[in-house]
């Protein structure tokens, strides 16, 4: 009975593939619309419609690209699956609500094709708002009259715009965003045409002149000083919030670790070890270290007697001093073993506090990411290349295995585990290679797109 049930579930999953893909594309389109309504007053996600910095716009553009890629992927899946499965079946779809043994508890969905077409229309509307920026071979042109300069502003909907007048002149309107073709401008009296693309590639005046005029206009604006002060206060607030959150990420786990070790975990471990008379050493490596330390003390004492550095002492006195040293070593390693056990539990609580901060402070994470982006992207190309080379040589460079070996041995000593040489060598042979691959992919995928000059400087410095 299990195999037919499994086949039935697989069949149902297959027939619901178009609906599932369309729903995911619809949700991604809704996320884009939510960003537009919340941060850009219902306008497309662009720098012209929001007073944000470079890092903030980079974040919004990244979110936009992520959702657009998800829409394209799910729509491709929808088209491929709908070629096999018919999604607009006009038949009534029955959905079981209650127990399968009660056939009367069903829900009829009679407008399923209308729901599909409504979702498709909404997804197409969202895609059409941003398809123009990605399809450069078919730009939308702006009809510019002979005696005016029109600054294009992309419309959010694909509604029809005013057409040309009868005498051949235009109103400077932008072509609808959903229209993929290019409209040519009619010739003027001199037989020439004037048009400007949506991206401003064919402006009547050079961009530098327009920027200069805009800067002069801003300088003469009586509210310019207030805007500058407002922007400065906003930037200072973001910086303060980011630094406070960064300090919280560092201080809270450290305080949690120390507090738990000294006041929560420590008393419990000490009481448990005292009741059970736990051993002195947690592993064989600690015992070997203690024996080696005691042997060195005895050999040093005898050597000092032989060279005359100390007065000659009897063998019984030497044995007494060795016994006293052995007792001191025993107490030291007993405390060290207890500290190792305490570190395991207190570190777990510190990691839990760190994760709890990350989960509950999502706004702080976004602010810190924006702050770090401003710092990194504000550096010069040579500084970016220097930092990349420093980190790559430190963690994945030629001398990095020695550093990883010291770190892993220190971590093992901190937690009271024996330093497994085979595991350390295996980790060094695999993890830096993976880290180096991630660095190279990040440089190729993101940095090469954001700052090609920094990549060129990095290659020249690395060579």
Image (cartoon, rainbow, N blue to C red):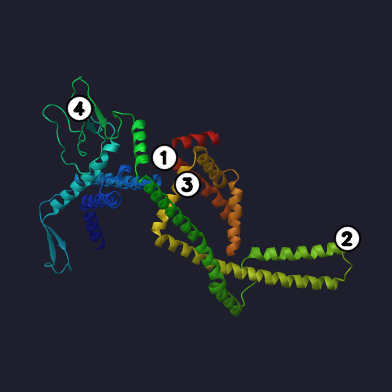
Is residue 315 shown left or right of residue 349?
right
* Pointer 2 or 3: first along the chain: 2
What x and y, as percent, mark residue 439? 48, 44
- Badge 1 vs badge 2, beta-carbon distance below 8 Å: no
> Of label 1 and label 4, which has the lower sequence position?
4
Nearest the camera: 167 or 409?
167
In terms of sequence position, does the residue under pointer 3 or pointer 4 come before the other?
4
Q: Give the farthest residue toward the top.
A: 190
Residue at left offset 39%, top offset 51%:
230
On the image, which quarter does residue 105 sit in? Answer: bottom left
Q: Secondary structure at mark 1?
A: helix
**CA separation in Å, label 1 and label 3:** 14 Å
> How many other residues sit within 10 Å of disc 4, few (<14), some (14-19) or many (≥20)?
many
93 and 269: which one is in front?
269
Q: Quadrant of the N terminus?
A: bottom left
Q: Quadrant of the C terminus?
A: top right
Label 1 crowding class (10 Å Cα cut-off): few <14, some 14-19, many 20+?
Answer: few
Which residue sits at x=59%, y=48%? 401
Could you say whether the residue bearing mark 4 is in a helix, strand or loop? Answer: loop
Q: Which mark is residue 185?
A: 4
Q: Which residue is tagged 3? A: 375
Give percent across and percent down for residue 68. 29, 45
Residue for badge 2: 307
Of labels 1 and 4, the one closer to you: 4
Q: Nearer the viewer, mark 2 or mark 4?
A: 4
Q: In this view of the protein, can residue 54 be seen by the observer?
A: yes
Mark on residue 450? 1
């Amino acid at each position: 009975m299990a195999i037919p049930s499994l086949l039935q579930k697989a069949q149902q999953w297959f027939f619901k593939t178009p609906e599932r893909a369309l729903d995911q594309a619809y949700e991604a389109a809704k996320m884009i619309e939510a960003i537009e309504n919340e941060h850009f007053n219902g306008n497309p996600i662009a720098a012209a419609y929001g007073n944000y910095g470079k890092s903030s716009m980079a974040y919004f553009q990244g979110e936009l690209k992520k959702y657009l890629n998800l829409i394209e992927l799910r729509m491709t899946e929808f088209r491929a699956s709908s070629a096999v499965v018919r999604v607009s079946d006009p038949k009534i779809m029955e959905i079981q609500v209650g127990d399968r043994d009660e056939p009367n508890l069903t829900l009829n969905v009679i407008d399923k094709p209308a729901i599909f077409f409504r979702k498709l229309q909404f997804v197409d509307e969202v895609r059409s708002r941003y398809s123009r920026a990605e399809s450069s071979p078919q730009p939308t042109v702006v009809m510019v009259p002979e005696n005016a300069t029109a600054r294009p502003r992309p419309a959010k909907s694909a509604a029809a715009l005013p057409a040309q007048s009868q005498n051949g002149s235009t109103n400077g309107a932008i072509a609808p965003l959903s229209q993929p073709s290019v409209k040519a401008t009619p010739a003027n009296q001199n037989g020439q045409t004037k048009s400007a693309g949506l991206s401003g590639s064919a402006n009547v005046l050079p961009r530098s002149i327009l920027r200069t005029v805009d800067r002069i206009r801003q300088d003469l604006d009586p509210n310019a000083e207030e805007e500058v002060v407002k922007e400065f206060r906003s930037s200072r607030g973001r910086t303060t919030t980011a630094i406070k959150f960064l300090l919280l990420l560092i201080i809270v786990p450290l305080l949690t670790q120390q507090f738990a070790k000294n006041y929560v975990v420590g008393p419990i471990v000490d009481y448990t070890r005292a009741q059970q008379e736990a051993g002195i050493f947690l592993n064989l490596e600690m015992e070997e270290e203690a024996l080696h330390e005691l042997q060195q003390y005895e050999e040093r004492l005898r050597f000092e007697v032989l060279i005359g550095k100390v007065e000659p002492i009897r063998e019984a006195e030497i044995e007494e001093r060795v016994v006293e040293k052995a007792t001191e070593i025993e107490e030291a390693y007993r405390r060290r073993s207890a500290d190792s056990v305490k570190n395991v539990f207190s570190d777990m609580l510190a990691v839990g506090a760190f994760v709890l901060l990350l989960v509950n402070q999502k706004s702080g994470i976004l602010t810190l990411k924006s702050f770090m982006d401003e710092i990194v992207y504000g550096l010069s190309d040579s500084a970016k290349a220097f930092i990349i080379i420093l980190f790559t040589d430190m963690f994945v460079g030629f001398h990095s295995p020695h550093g990883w070996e010291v770190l892993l041995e220190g971590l093992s000593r901190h937690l009271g585990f024996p330093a497994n040489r085979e595991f350390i060598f295996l980790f060094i042979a695999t993890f830096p290679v993976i880290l180096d691959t991630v660095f190279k992919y990040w440089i190729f995928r993101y940095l090469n797109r954001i700052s090609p000059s920094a990549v060129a400087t990095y290659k020249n410095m690395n060579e």
